[in-house]
Image (spheres, rainbow, N blue to C red):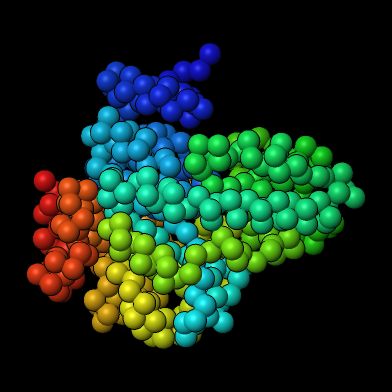
Amino acid sequence: MQNNFEKLNDQDKNLRLMALKELYEAGELVPCADKDEVNNHIHTTYSFSPYSPTMAVAKAYVAGLSTAGIMDHDSISGAREFLEAGKIVGLKTTIGAECRASMEDTPIADRRINNPDQNGVVYMTLHGVPHTQIDKLEAFFKPYVEARNRRNRKMVENCNKLLSSYGITLDFDADVLPLSQNAVGGSVTERHLLYALALKIIAVFGKGAGCIGFLKNTMGLSISPKIEEFLLDENNPHYAYDLLGVLKSDMIGKIYIDATDECPKIRDILAFAKEIGAIPAYAYLGDVGQSVTGDKKAQKFEDDYLELLFETISELGFEAVTYMPSRNTVEQLDRVMALCDKYNLFQISGEDINSPRQSFYCEKLQDPKFHHLIDATFALIGHETKATEDLSLGMFSKETKEKYPDIKERVKVYQAYGLE
């Protein structure tokens, strides 16, 4: 029989929320000391994550966060549950979604931007979605999710061509879809496919030396000493996730198919974001050396043409840039923050949570250098509250921008709303 902690990840949303309420009222959820930290980029099972929206809120609360934000790929279907869970434990929340968009017909259409697998496609986020607009955003994503699944099926075929001779085959409907919340509005990402593949590899080759031998000697994959140590440990509770990281870093290129139909054109999604009162943000990645998240190989991205990038996103109508302080060097972050100031762009932070090894908070936010990102999160909450009341009251409405043209002044006004 499940205990209440296990029920936080139950398949039934109502049982998840009921379990959270019981745990909270019984005093069994004990937060760490308040760290005055925020996280606006928490993935849930509605894209890829070990955590349901309810479990994600519980983890954020126990970690001592002041606020938590849901951020799923091509889906906002977990948002209402996330909001309700936040109310149960008294944690301020924000809701949003992450997606990819085509940068065709822009000055950077042929560049490797912030997508490790494909040129001319950008990862972006929609923050502070007014609660009255959830259904509209769900409807917007639906055809793109369907297109994504058509491509997912083709990548499963590529995977089987590559691996069937080793006794490894995947069935999209039997092996991949059940790992997702696709039936209730969630998306299916490359990580779902690779997690299903990780489970198959474990089933065929076992854990430890057998698995590592297959990866290195048969498939020719590179494994860092740290990850190899994890994979040698057959009792490692995160084994499948660690194996997924290896596959995401070094094997995805062997089966990847370019995303086309599932990527809205950048101007279309920016116009839609404006229509629903969401805040569109460019997701800065920066050149990668040693991957903090463990699933990105060393690779160059937008740093060589950052000035052109900022000029382009500003002209297109992006209102914000989101970045993760733990991922980049001080030099990279100084440059990004200076360009945000130059182009009057809102700065949003969040740590990309999709693995059980990741912490829900970012210790770098304790550095006074980044305290403005905490202020910005409360401004984001203020925006979401006001825009839910009336879209014209949002932080980036025409009326508000005319009243407070400077972003720093606007942040102070909306921060006050968010702290109410």
Q: Quadrant of residue 241?
A: top right
> Relative to residue 106, is residue 83 drawn left or right?
left
> Relative to residue 135, is residue 131 drawn left or right?
left
Q: Quadrant of residue 8?
A: top left
The total of numbered circles placed on residues is: 0
- Is residue 79 visible from the viewing direction of this image? yes
> Where in the figure is residue 133, as x and y percent of width and height?
31, 49
Residue sitting nearer the eye, 199 or 271: 271
> Relative to residue 19, is residue 190 drawn left or right?
right
Residue drawn at (51%, 43%), measured in percent from left and top? Answer: 186
Residue drawn at (47%, 85%), measured in percent from left and top? Answer: 107
Q: Quadrant of residue 125?
A: bottom left
Q: Residue furthest right?
A: 165
> Where in the figure is residue 318, as x and y percent of width and height?
34, 71
- Is residue 247 visible from the viewing direction of this image? no
Against 308, residue 277 (above or below) is above
Residue sitting nearer the eye, 283 or 205: 283
Residue sitting nearer the eye, 186 or 198: 186
Residue drawn at (46%, 18%), measured in percent from left and top? Answer: 3
Residue drawn at (27%, 64%), measured in percent from left and top? Answer: 370
> Relative to residue 300, is residue 254 drawn left or right?
right
> Where in the figure is residue 341, as x and y percent of width and height?
25, 77
Against 129, residue 7 (above or below) is above
Against 93, residue 161 (above or below) is below
Residue sitting nearer the eye, 184 or 384: 184
> Where in the figure is residue 334, as x and y percent of width and height?
33, 76
